[in-house]
Amino acid sequence: MKVFLTRTMNKTPMLIPNLGLGYLATALIRAGHEVTVLDCILEGVDARAFAERLANQSYDLIGFQVYTFDVRYLSAYLEASRRVAPRAVLVAGGPHPTAAPEEMLTEFPQLEAVFCGEAEPGLPLLCERLAELGAAGAPQFPSWSQAGHFEAVPGLVVRDGGGDFIRNQRRFVEDLDATGFPAWDKLKPLAYPPAPQGTFTRRLPVAPIIVTRGCPFDCTFCAGHLIAGKKLRSRSARNVVDEIEFLVREYGIQEIHIEDDNFSLNRKMVSSFCQELLAREIDVSWSCPNGLRLDSLDQELVGLMARAGCYSIALGIESGSQRILDLMKKRLKVTEVTDKINMIRRSSDISITGFFMIGYPGETEAEIRETIRLSRTLDLDKVNFGAFMPLPGSTAFNELKKQGRLHDLDYTRITEYRAAVSFAGLSARRLRMYLQWSFIRFYMRPHIIVRFLRQIKSWYQVRILGQRLLEVFWR
């Protein structure tokens, strides 16, 4: 099969190689399929240009990775696909289809199928089944509802032809080492700008990696477990360092960003990873910009991470109100936060970014002010304040839906900084004011400004910072 994998263009300022599509590409190539990967965000490919890319290529299957914020853009790309590639099977996967598969198939009739969860086990098998049937030539598939032929494809959701849906059981990848590395030749890491997640870097060029999958926690604002499940699975330290060594050798990468949700949770693996890096004497810096849990860190581990080249971490603190932390099921005490951050300062010179959320359902103005006040008392280098987003599949989303508060939800308004919808005890306009005020209160201090300016390495980073300021204060 000739497969095309992509994510639609959107306005995100964060631009990094798409590891999800990279792992899918590897799984498909191993199964004997021909794969093209297109990052529409990187290349600025809108729906019209997308149609031009597809024209005269005879793709058998076109797969779209879809986040909730991408839903607003998807229809135009599907229409372009159906117009210029009428014989191709159109499939979607990723966080939003995983959270709302039937909704996706109902809202987008051009889609033949969606995948829930990790698609590496299922997508190559779907391609195999389609090739066996010779079904790739038909835009609508009477064979989708044939009992038995697609029931073995893990995570697949299709229409049954009678107005209902067939939803296959998911399967998680148990041996992460066996998945191989993402198809880096398809991802082209050197084509990406020098302002990845977190914007700041110590050295260039940069590449992201993923070490673990799964999350055993129950944070109510997050739906990450829908994709990767509750069970934490880790690559071996040797396998991770092999990938880093490959990136250094083949692409000249000098800095690695670990994009995991729970990198530090498996303490034994982190320790082995650091020791493996030190033993091989690989000249690379690394950071954890996606956020670590404070309760997973101790003095010995932080010191070892620093010696192995870690220079920056982000911490998911979320709120200065214990009541809100408890409602979020964060399993964190406000009283622990200061002690843990002071421990990190004593143990290393690692730069610390704090992640905070305001506007959680039921949160009061006094509790928002507690969060802003806590951010100023902590010894942090940087912060990021984001408005609560009702992400489909999260516990908070499900509760709000049950309460009838999401009947007019517009996915195009779900963004980190816009705060266009408020579910807290204040108006959306006032919530946005607090979001803006939180950045001003933290950053408008001389010592923070000096720390901040010292980390800027390029004019491109200045441009990205300008875009984020626009998002917070004007858009």
Image (cartoon, helix red, strand yellow):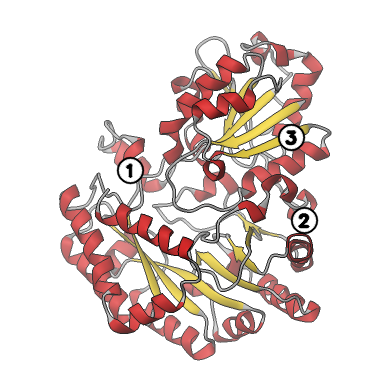
Which of pointers 2 and 3 lies earlier in the amino acid sequence? 3
- Side of 453 relative to 136 (left or right): left
The amino acid type found where label 1 is placed reads Glu
The amino acid type found where label 2 is placed reads Asp
Q: How far from the left and from the top, in percent, is residue 294?
A: 47, 73
Answer yes or no: do the residues labelled 2 and 1 have beta carbons within 8 Å? no
Task: Please name the residue shown 46% across and 64% down the image.
Answer: 459
Task: Please name the residue shown 34% across and 78% down the image.
Answer: 449
Nearer to us in this view, 453 or 297: 453
Calculate the distance from the C-alpha at mark 2 to the C-alpha at mark 3: 21 Å
Crowd around label 3: few <14 · some 14–19 · many ≥20 (10 Å): many
The amino acid type found where label 3 is placed reads Val
**Residue that badge 1 annotates:** 399
- Which quadrant of the figure has residue 85? top right
Q: How far from the left and from the top, in percent, is residue 469?
A: 32, 59
Specify the label residue 177 is tagged with: 2
Task: Please name the residue shown 31% across and 40% down the image.
Answer: 413
Nearer to us: label 2 or label 3: 3
Image vertical order of residue 434 relative to residue 80, above or below: below
